[in-house]
Image (tube, helix red, strand yellow):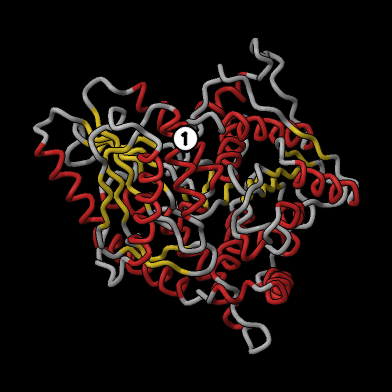
Amino acid sequence: MASEEEAEGELSARYQKALDALSSLITKRSLFVNNNQSHRFHLLFHYLKVLELEEVVSELKIIHVAGTKGKGSTCTFSESILRGYGLRTGLFTSPHLIDVRERFRLNGIEISQEKFVDYFWCCFHKLKEKTSNEIPMPTYFCFLALLAFKIFATEQVDVVILEVGLGGRYDATNVIQKPVVCGVTSLGYDHMEILGHTLAEIAAEKAGIFKSGVPAFTVPQPDEAMRILDEKASKLDVKLQVVEPLDSSQRLGLQGEHQYLNASLAVALCSTFLQKIGIIEDKNDTNDGLPERVISGLSNAYLMGRAMIVPDSELPEEIVFYLDGAHSPESMEACATWFSQQVKERNQKISEQILLFNCMTVRDPSLLLPRLRTKCIDQGVEFKNAVFVPNMSVYNQVGGSWSKFEQRVDDSTTWQLGLKSIWDNIARGEAKTKSRSDSKEEEKSLVFSSLPLAVDWLRDSARRKSKQVRFQVLVTGSLHLVGDLLRLVKKRNV
C-alpha cells in the first residue's frame, strides 16, 4: 500500500501532467480576429455536446458578469453573499495569479488538485477523441470555461457566478443561454485591439451577454457607453437598471473607494437572484437597509491580488508590499487613491514609497503611469524610487494565462527601459513647473532584468537603513506581476 507521501507525489505528478496538457491548448493572439472569434465561439456548442453538458448547463442557475473594471470584485462579493444564504456556490474567474485552480471555487475554496485532475482528464480525453481538421481542440480559455461547467454541474452547485474572460459577445462563458441575471461593471478602454477603439464598440461587445427577458444591472457609465447598453437592452426586452454606490460606512472585505460601486452591483445581482429562485431575504434589516447576511457577505469577501497588503517574508517590519493588479487608466487612479490612503493611515514610523511596476505590451503605459503618478501626488504621496521589471511567469497568449513559474533573467529589458523613460519624462515635466525651493531629494528610477533581483535590491536597501525606515512598495500594472511577487515572497495564503 502506498504511503501518504508517495500518494501525494503521484498526485503532484498527475497534476503537472494535466498542466502540461492544458498548455498544449495555447494558441496565438492572432486567432482573436473577429471572424475567427465567431467561428471559435460557435464551436463551443459542439464541445458542449461532446461533453454531454448541453442539458446540465441549461439547468445551471447563473449570474453572468461582464465589464472592463471590477468584474472579479463584483463576482467575489456576489459569491460571498450567496454563500451566506446557505447556497452551494461555484465561482469561475480569471486570470489566476499563482495556480490555475484559483479560477474554480466551490463554496469559496479553490478546487482540490485531485478533483481538478479527474475533471480535467475526463474533459480532455473526450474532446481529444472528437478532434479533426475542421474541429480542433478548444483554445486555452475555452477549455477552462468548459471545464468550469463540468465541475459545477457535477458538483451540483446551487448557483454559478460566472465572470466573462474577454468582451462578452464571443466570450466562451457566453455559451450559456438563460442566466438568472446579468451584470455589467464599469466600462473603459481595454483590449481595444480586440473589442474596438471607442466606448460604444466596447459597450456593444459587453452587452453581448444580455439575453432576452433576463434582468440586468449596471453601474453609472459614460454617456456613449450607456446609450449602447440601453439600446441593446431595449432590443432584447431586458430590464436594465443602474445602481449607485453603497454608503461608505458599510465595511467591505475588498479595499478601495471603487469597491462600493462593485459591492452595490453585487447586492443588486444577489437580491434579484434570491427573488428569482424563491428565497426571501432577511426581514431583519439593519439601519442602512441591507440584510444582515448581505452585510456579512460584503465584509467577508476576499480576492487575492486586489488591494492586498503583504509584509515581506524576510523583512516584515522593513518592507510591506501593497498589491493591486490595476492595468487600465481608470483602475490606476483607483489604485493610487487606495495606496495613498494606506500610506496616510499606516505611517507609524518613517517610510519611503517605492513603485514596482510592469504592464503588458498590449497596454499603453503613457496612459497608465501619468494617471498613477498624478493621483498619488495630488494626495501627498511621492515615490522615492520607481522600479521596472519583467514578469517572471511564462505568458500564454490566450485567456491571460500564466502556466509556468521560472526564476529566470529575461534576455531583454527593452520594454521596461521604455517604461522608465516615460516615468522619467513625467518627472522632468513636473520639475520644470516647480521652483528649486519646492524640490525634494531627487527620485531615482531603476530597471532590473528580473523580479528576484529587484526584491534583493529592496531587501539590501532596507537592511542598510538599519530598521529606521519602512519601505511601502506599491506593486501594480499587471495581475501577473502581482502573482509573481506573491509567489516569490511565499505569501500565498494571506
Label 1 sits on a secondary structure element that is helix
Q: Nearer the viewer, residue 144 or 398?
A: 398
Q: Position of residue 248 (x, y in %)?
A: 57, 20
Q: Which residue is mark 1?
A: 375
For image coordinates 79% across by 36% down, the residue present is 276
Q: Position of residue 18 (x, y in %)?
A: 43, 70
Q: Is residue 406 visible?
A: yes
Image side of residue 114 versus residue 295, left or right = left
Q: Furthest-bottom residue in view?
A: 133
Please tell me how many numbered marks the rendered image carries.
Answer: 1
For image coordinates 44% across by 47% down, the residue present is 369
Assess disc 1: are there few (<14), some (14-19) or many (≥20) residues with their C-alpha within 10 Å of its C-alpha.
many
The N terminus lies in quadrant? bottom left
Q: Amino acid at mark 1?
A: Lys
For image coordinates 23% across by 56% down, the residue present is 452
Q: Position of residue 45 (x, y in %)?
A: 73, 70
Image side of residue 231 versus residue 411, left or right = right
User: Eyeballing the image, is 262 above or below 172?
Assistant: above
User: Eyeballing the image, is 403 above or below 334?
Assistant: below
Image side of residue 487 versus residue 160, left or right = left
Q: Nearer the viewer, residue 466 or 84?
A: 466
Q: Nearer the viewer, residue 325 or 144?
A: 325
